[in-house]
Amino acid sequence: MPPSLRPLLFRRLLSASTPSPAPAPVPRPTDPALLLRLCTILYQHQQAPDDKLRRRLSALPLPTAPADLRELFLQASARFPLSWRPVHRLLEHLSALHHGASDGSGGGAFPHSPATAARLLDVLAKSGNIDLLHSTLFSLPRTLLSAAALRAAVRGLAPSREVGKVAAIVTLFPECHRARILTFVTDVACSEPCRLPDVAEKVIKRAEHRHGVSRTARCDDLLVVAYCRAGALADACRVWNGMERRGLEPGAAAYQEIVVTMFKNNRAADAMTVFDGMRRSGVRDGGGGCCRAVVSWLCKDGKVWGAYMVFAEMVKIGVEVDGEVLGDLVYGLMARRRIREGYRVFHGVREKEIALYHGLMKGLLRIKRAGEATEVLREMIARGCEPNMHTYIMLLQGHLGKRGRKGRDPLVNFESIFVGGLVKAGRTLEATKFVERTMWGGVNVPRFDYNKFLYYFSNEEGALMFEEVGKRLREVGQIDLADILSTYGERMTTRDRRRRAMNGLLESVQDVC
């Protein structure tokens, strides 16, 4: 044998002597007829005695392999997402079936996987069986507790305000991982669909006092964000002050949320104080969200000089300036009647976004220049920027007001077009309510919902109606309002037609490919 082939033969013999691990068995697809019969029996006999249910289920040709049992359990439990009893009784029967098929080494437990364990906990949580959820969670091995399983358990225990049971979840893991698990539990309790920051805070305190787990800065950040989004600014400030006492530095998300909440509560001075503290502490505003929020609210409050300073700082530190920031800046300048500067900023942007156009339109409407705002709409369409529903509603409110203004021609009037349009669309109740509020103007403020009106006529019939209304409005000299409604009729009401055409185009492209 040549010397060059000896190492190759040696490696081949070595690889043959060491058996490779067998791949995981692929579960066979469950028979749909069998699944239907199984779910029917579980539903009809969920309150039946154990012997009767076991006799019914034993007549079915259920699989015995662990992989097939898991697949059968996943598909059957998907049929009962909110009912724990059929799923639990099926689990007991499959455990007995697996115990009978094993050689004595498998035990009587169901061969769970992380996916089946998470599905079981999710069903128990959604059905509201808290005791069974808690006992099942603590009976499962730690290796089966995935992120999905823990998330399902917290979403079931937190709304029931089982603080002790939620806090005890951290004891399922070693001490080196308990702080990370506590952060995960806090995140789940503070986010959708729970949104329970008060429960999350009690869980953190219980974990600190009972189990000796120290909270992290991320836990307090999540509490501050959740309290701010719930409108509880006092609780958010209390958690914020506690972070300062413990020497924990808030993150960029907490800074942004508390600054925005303070602006919403008309505490602009406190918001700017917190924002200055963020800049002094050196916290990096990763996506520039806090700076964008400050620029937006300062422009709304008319403090354009302060917005300019923050805008210059954004450019200096390299934060990306998008169309929303520039649109807010243009609106702030227009609202302060600094029209020349606003147009200078607007025309200084090469690639204009829809948010920039909206900022200029909103500023012009604020200073009662609805005609110029309509000119911006025409330029917007000419440059290829597609308007959306907010564009048309904003312009209609600028021309007609939130209550609706009467025109000079009684045939082409607010009542004849918009209120009459509601009646024509079959929405007589909305039209009657608006007329009643108009008659009782001293008590109720009559506000017309342009959004619903445009939604009712977003069809082929609406395209013809808006075209006819546009012709009549041009005859009486209301060119701007006619262009707005005609443009909506041409572009927005035919969107279903465009979608059908685009879907047909995509299907034809797929056929060609």
Image (cartoon, rainbow, N blue to C red):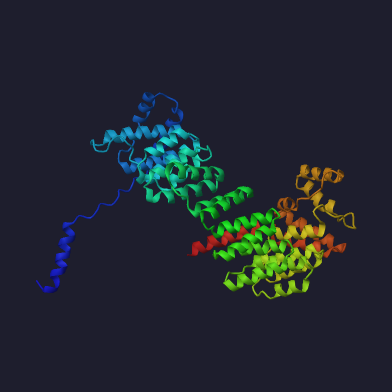
Does residue 80 appear in the picture of this structure? no
Residue situated furthest left in the rendering? 1
Where residue 342 appears, as percent x and y from the top left, is: 74, 71
Where residue 173 appears, as percent x and y from the top left, is: 38, 46
Relative to 319, residue 398 above or below: above
Does residue 411 appear in the picture of this structure? yes
Q: Quadrant of residue 500?
A: bottom right
Relative to 332, residue 24 above or below: above
Where residue 229 appears, as percent x and y from the top left, is: 61, 50
Nearest the viewer among 132 and 424 is: 132
Q: Quadrant of residue 335?
A: bottom right
Image quadrant for the N terminus? bottom left
Q: How many marks?
A: 0
Nearest the viewer among 354 and 274 is: 274
- Which residue corresponds to the image point at 62% horizontal and 68% vertical from the top-left? 322
Query: Is 370 left or right of 267, judged from the image as shown?
Result: right
Relative to 450, residue 428 above or below: above
Nearest the viewer among 495 and 148 is: 148
Where residue 324 appears, as percent x and y from the top left, is: 65, 65
- Which residue corresponds to the image point at 84% horizontal and 63% vertical from the top-left? 478
Query: Is 55 left or right of 10, judged from the image as shown?
Result: right
Nearest the viewer among 250 and 260 is: 250
